[in-house]
Image: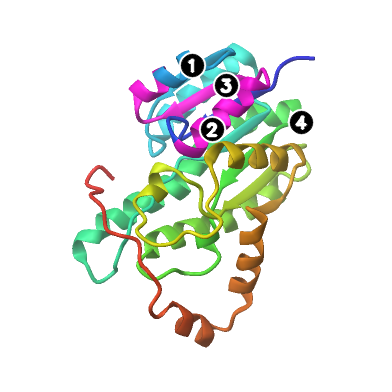
């Protein structure tokens, strides 16, 4: 049986790194994409299986197309493509200096996912198999105060993935939306508030991989946050407003690189 072929963006740290390590332990061939070349090289050297790294920014559609063409030329169409790259930052619409952050967050979290999937779909359609996996967030279920850019981008991701799932339904390609709660990563390390059901990235990676293997359409991980998400979704707007009025807000960070 030939090994799985897995392509992962945002692979240099956090969930992406944990997923790469998980699949490598299973003997998969891994394509690693992220901005930080030094961390990608370090990760690649540590993996016990064949891998190739692609230092790139997911906002660069041409770079992702080149990476996809190289990966397919080397190994054939991937079995799994995981669009994991994402950023988060506190934002307020009233602040003009946050406009660039809004654009960067949406470009990376949403368009970066589109750019990741697009160049792989043709080869996957030819094989009539494969899984596209998008990492969304519970924050995409309802708008969170102080996180307008992040919540909006993840809500858009959820809707986009649903559209894509229906589009590819007859082509043998599954689309899985994973909406994590709090995973201990550099992205959540800056949060100065309590994070219920915080999960270690290696534990999360195993649960993500199980959901992908089972071709789940939409799943919230951990399951406790799934119930929280259900409650969030159905609360009337007036009650949501009351509950969120004094909710803690994500701190602003230096996102000049966005």
- Mark 4 and 1 residues: CB-CB less than 8 Å, in contact? no
Which residue lies at the image location 58% right of the left edge and 56% below the top edge?
158
124 to the left or right of 155: right
**Above or below, comparing residue 1 to residue 234 in the picture:** above
Task: Find residue 128 and name its label.
Answer: 4
Q: Earlier in the sequence, mark 4 or mark 1?
A: 1
How far is disc 3 from disc 2 in space, using C-alphas? 12 Å
Task: Find residue 30 and name its label.
Answer: 3
Q: Earlier in the sequence, mark 2 or mark 1?
A: 2
Q: Residues within 10 Å of mark 1 (few under 14, many from 20)?
A: few
How far is disc 3 from disc 1 in space, using C-alphas? 12 Å
Mark closer to the observer (3, 2)? 2
Q: Quadrant of the N terminus?
A: top right
- Mark 4 and 2 residues: CB-CB less than 8 Å, in contact? no
Check residue 5 for magenta coloring: no
How far is disc 2 from disc 1 in space, using C-alphas? 12 Å
Q: Secondary structure at mark 1?
A: helix
Q: Earlier in the sequence, mark 3 or mark 2?
A: 2
| Residue at the spot of label 2 | 18
- Mark 3 and 1 residues: CB-CB less than 8 Å, in contact? no
Frontmost residue, 67 versus 191: 191
Q: Residues within 10 Å of mark 2 (few under 14, many from 20)?
A: many
């Amino acid at each position: 049986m030939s090994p799985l072929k897995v392509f992962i963006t945002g692979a240099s740290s956090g969930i992406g790194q944990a997923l790469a390590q998980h699949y490598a332990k299973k003997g998969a061939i891994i394509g690693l994409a992220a901005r930080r070349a030094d961390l990608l090289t370090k990760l690649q050297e540590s993996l016990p299986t064949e891998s190739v790294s692609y230092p790139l920014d997911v906002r660069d559609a041409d770079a992702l197309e080149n990476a996809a063409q190289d990966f397919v030329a080397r190994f054939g169409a991937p079995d799994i493509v995981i669009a994991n790259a994402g950023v988060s930052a506190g934002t307020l619409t009233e602040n003009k200096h946050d406009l660039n952050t809004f654009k960067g967050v949406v470009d990376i979290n949403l368009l970066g996912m589109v750019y990741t999937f697009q160049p792989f779909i043709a080869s996957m359609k030819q094989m009539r198999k494969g899984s596209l996996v998008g990492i969304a967030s519970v924050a995409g279920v309802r708008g969170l105060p102080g996180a307008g850019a992040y919540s909006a981008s993840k809500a858009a991701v959820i809707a986009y993935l649903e559209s894509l799932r229906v589009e590819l339904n007859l082509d043998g390609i599954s689309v899985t939306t994973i909406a994590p709660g709090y995973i201990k990563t550099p992205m959540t390390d800056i949060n100065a508030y309590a994070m219920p059901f915080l999960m270690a990235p290696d534990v999360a990676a195993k649960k993500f991989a199980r959901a992908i293997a089972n071709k789940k359409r939409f799943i919230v991980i951990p399951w406790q946050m799934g119930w929280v998400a259900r409650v969030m979704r159905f609360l009337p707007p007036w009650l949501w407003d009351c509950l969120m009025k004094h909710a803690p807000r994500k701190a602003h960070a230096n996102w000049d690189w966005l």
